[in-house]
Image (cartoon, rainbow, N blue to C red):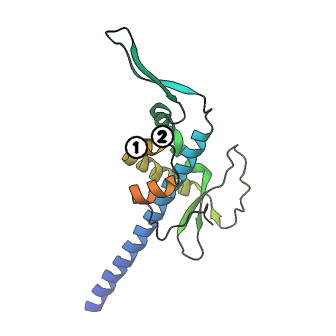
């Protein structure tokens, strides 16, 4: 009977480890997809478009403390994007890396709404995957909204790595290689 208890404990530990890795793959994939979507949306905005920020009160000298900032990376625009970006997770499928057995999430629908030019072999596309990815995305937006706005309010290189691996620790940057890097 003692052997069964040890076996059950070992099995529980293995299942817990497997679940944790699946969860990390999911949250890492959601973070990376979120970054891709936000970067694309920001790039679509006319760089000349600005928004007035600051106080609209009149100072004692009759002036106003208003500045014009680029709209694409303004807090107002980023907040608007964060409210709707997770809906795009339905345009992603799940792919398992054959060498690491880790899950990656790849866009399967083109930006114009047509099917992607990608080879879809080996990519699972279903409502369970997109729903789970959307929920993970929403959790990330809720938990890390300030960090997301901070990162995207200024241009930066390697946002995926800096945000998803280093700042939030959602990705294990030693083991995870994005499909962009392949």
Element class at badge 1: helix
**For this rendering, which residue is in front, 59 or 126?**
59
- Residue at image position (69%, 44%) is 113
Residue 53 locus on image (x, y percent): 44, 25
Is 27 in front, or is 167? Answer: 167
Residue 177 x %, y %: 54, 66
Q: Nearer the N terminus, badge 1 or badge 2?
A: 2
- Real-space Cα distance between discs 1 and 2? 8 Å
Q: Is residue 70 above or below residue 33?
A: above
User: Which residue shows up at 33% across the image and 86% down it?
Assistant: 7
Whether residue 134 is visible to the viewer of this picture, yes or no, is yes
Secondary-structure class at tag 2? helix
Q: Quadrant of residue 170?
A: bottom left
Q: Is residue 136 above or below residue 71?
A: below
Circle 2 is placed at which residue position? 82
- Let me know if residue 132 appears in the view: no
Q: Position of residue 164 (x, y in %)?
A: 45, 56
Q: Residues within 10 Å of mark 2 (few under 14, many from 20)?
A: many
Residue receiving disc 1? 145
Q: Position of residue 86 (x, y in %)?
A: 51, 45
């Amino acid at each position: 009977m003692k052997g069964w208890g040890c076996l059950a404990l070992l099995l529980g530990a293995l299942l817990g480890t497997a679940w944790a890795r699946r969860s990390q793959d999911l949250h890492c994939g959601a973070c990376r997809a979120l970054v891709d979507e936000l970067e694309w949306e920001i790039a679509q905005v006319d760089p000349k478009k600005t928004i007035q920020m600051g106080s609209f009160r009149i100072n004692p000298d009759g002036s106003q403390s208003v500045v014009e900032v680029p709209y694409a990376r303004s807090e107002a625009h980023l907040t608007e994007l964060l409210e709707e970006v997770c809906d795009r997770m339905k345009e992603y499928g799940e792919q398992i890396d054959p060498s690491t057995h880790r899950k990656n999430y790849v866009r399967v629908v083109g930006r114009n709404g047509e099917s992607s030019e990608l080879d879809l072999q080996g990519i699972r596309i279903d409502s369970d995957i997109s729903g789970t990815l959307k929920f993970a995305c929403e959790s990330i937006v809720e938990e890390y909204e300030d960090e997301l706005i901070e990162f995207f309010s200024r241009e930066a290189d390697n946002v995926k790595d800096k945000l998803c691996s280093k700042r939030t620790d959602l990705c294990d940057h030693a083991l995870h290689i994005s499909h962009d890097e392949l």
